[in-house]
Image (cartoon, rainbow, N blue to C red):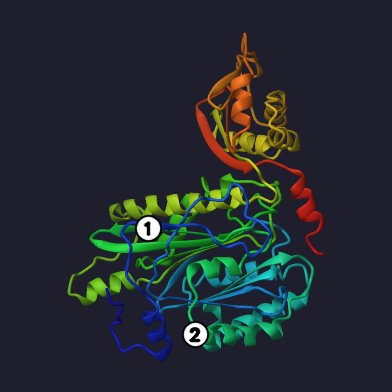
């Protein structure tokens, strides 16, 4: 399917169009190969990754900026077709980085033409220098793309409190463009810090009779307990959807994906999730003489399959982040039911997921369910002590507030020796439930973070 425009495209738009390729109805898979940020890939990494299709109106470029790393790409530059719409959610941190503040303001316009992401330096808590670097970056990206600075979105990740050399970013963006188009794995690799593998995935679905593609990349390994967003996540689609619809869909699907994970209970200064829609898939259908009624509300029935795909893709990326938790050896699912509200269930789940005692017990493959009881109690949410049920690996270990009569720990211990751990808790006060995901806490988490700036 060619990706043309109704009017003769500019040189920059021609370049964006030529970068597109054929759609995949069902994504093929390949073995993960990215190991650029650490000596070995997390043992919890997915066994296979999607072969990523191109998306019309998205041009990826990467390079080494010279601002942090010496032997790897650490700068991503994405140029987007005209009329691209954008939605976003961001950290609620009171010490949010300048790139986050810049994106929040630009989001009001709903339009996007470029995205710049650097790794290794968070450009956070550096006073006036932080905003100055953002402005220099936006000016350089706007010049290269031929757009307004307010249509440029910027994200940074890495060390907090160190000044990012803005004068190096502009030339690096030009170098990235000259080096040619990058693929999605290269893009995901360029935004990594302590990650041990690049995180990316794709989905292809229909909106009405139109095939549309969703691609996503993410980074994150530590400083993970988001609130309205997570680490850095960038989602792209060739669907034609207005910013208002994108924003509603993104916020709805964030709750049970990026807002339902934790590695270490810490919320970053830089957490950003952006969703871009280029509209190129719909443009082609319109040019072929098939009228398409615009979608103007998130509840449009034609979006049912798209929303399901977006939800699935976001949860996939969220799980990839947890599976790359710093030093992680266990992927843990915690389901809380019988709660007074979804909010309460989620809070109890996070209390369990963030407990160092629970996490270290799981790391040591110790079925010490008393620590789960403790974590429920400290959550501050309503729970009936004498109706509490705890299940590990689908095996009841405590029921009605006491240990199960004749409890045999052997099958539970066997479950704890696996890599995927499942915990279920019923707090006995209502019907609400929530699921959160986390990883264990190992010696390597301390080693990685003790050595982070060295």
Residue 27 position in % (x across, y down)? 37, 58
Spatial CA distance of label 1 from label 2 is 33 Å
Front disc: 1 or 2: 1
Residue 397 position in % (x across, y down)? 61, 19
- Picture disc at residue 27: 1
Q: Is residue 139 left or right of residue 378?
A: left
Please tell me which residue lies in front, 428 or 2. Answer: 2
Q: Quadrant of the N terminus?
A: bottom left
**Quarter of image, res 452:** bottom right
65 above or below 295? below
**Quarter of image, res 358:** top right
- Picture disc at residue 147: 2
Label 1 crowd (10 A; few <14 / some 14-19 / many >=20): some
Residue 395 position in % (x across, y down)? 55, 21
Q: Residue at x 69, y 84 (%)?
A: 168
Question: Is residue 144 in view?
Answer: yes
Residue 451 position in % (x across, y down)? 81, 58
Please tell me which residue lies in front, 355 or 142. Answer: 355
Q: Is residue 269 left or right of residue 256?
A: right
Please tell me which residue lies in front, 366 or 115. Answer: 366
Q: Is residue 8 left or right of residue 264?
A: left
Q: What residue occupies the far left of the structure in this picture?
A: 289
Q: Is residue 449 left or right of residue 22?
A: right
Question: Is residue 390 in view?
Answer: no
Label 2 crowd (10 A; few <14 / some 14-19 / many >=20): some
């Amino acid at each position: 399917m060619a990706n043309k425009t109704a009017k003769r495209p500019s040189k920059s738009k021609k370049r964006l169009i030529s970068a597109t390729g054929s759609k995949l109805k069902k994504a093929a898979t390949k073995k993960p190969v990215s190991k650029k940020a650490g000596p070995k890939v997390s043992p919890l990494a997915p066994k296979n990754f999607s072969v990523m299709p191109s998306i019309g109106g998205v041009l990826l470029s990467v390079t080494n900026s010279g601002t942090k790393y010496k032997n790897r790409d650490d700068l991503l530059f994405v140029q987007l077709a005209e009329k691209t719409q954008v939605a976003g959610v961001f950290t609620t941190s009171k010490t949010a980085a300048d790139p986050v503040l810049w994106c929040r303001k630009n989001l009001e316009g709903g339009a996007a033409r470029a995205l710049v992401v650097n790794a290794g330096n968070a450009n956070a808590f550096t006073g006036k220098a932080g905003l100055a670097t953002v402005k220099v970056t936006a000016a350089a990206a706007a010049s290269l793309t031929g757009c307004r600075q307010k249509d440029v979105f910027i994200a940074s990740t890495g060390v907090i409190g160190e000044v990012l050399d803005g004068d190096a970013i502009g030339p690096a963006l030009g170098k990235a463009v000259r080096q040619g188009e990058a693929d999605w794995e290269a893009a995901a690799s360029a935004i990594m810090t302590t990650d041990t593998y690049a995180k990316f995935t794709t989905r292809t679905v229909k909106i009405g009779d139109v095939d549309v593609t969703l691609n996503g990349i993410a980074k994150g390994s530590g400083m993970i307990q988001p609130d309205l967003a997570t680490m850095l996540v960038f989602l792209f689609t060739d669907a034609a959807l207005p910013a208002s619809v994108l924003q509603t869909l993104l916020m709805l699907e964030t709750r049970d994906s990026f807002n339902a994970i934790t590695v270490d209970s810490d919320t970053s200064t830089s957490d950003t999730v952006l969703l871009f829609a280029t509209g190129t898939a719909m443009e082609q259908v319109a040019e072929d003489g098939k009228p398409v009624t615009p979608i103007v509300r998130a509840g449009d029935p034609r979006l049912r399959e798209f929303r399901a795909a977006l939800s699935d893709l976001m949860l996939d990326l969220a799980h990839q982040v947890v599976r790359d938790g710093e030093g992680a050896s266990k992927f843990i699912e915690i389901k809380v039911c019988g709660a007074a509200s979804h909010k309460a269930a989620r809070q109890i789940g996070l209390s369990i997921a963030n407990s160092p005692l629970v996490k270290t017990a799981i790391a040591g493959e110790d079925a010490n369910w008393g620590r789960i009881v403790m974590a429920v109690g400290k959550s501050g949410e309503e729970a009936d002590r004498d109706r509490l049920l705890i299940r590990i690996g689908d095996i009841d270990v405590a029921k009605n507030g006491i240990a199960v009569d004749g409890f045999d720990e052997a099958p539970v211990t066997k479950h704890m020796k696996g890599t995927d751990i499942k915990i279920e808790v019923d707090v006995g006060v209502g019907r609400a439930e929530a699921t959160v995901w986390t990883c264990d806490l190992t010696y390597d988490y301390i080693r990685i973070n003790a050595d982070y700036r060295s």
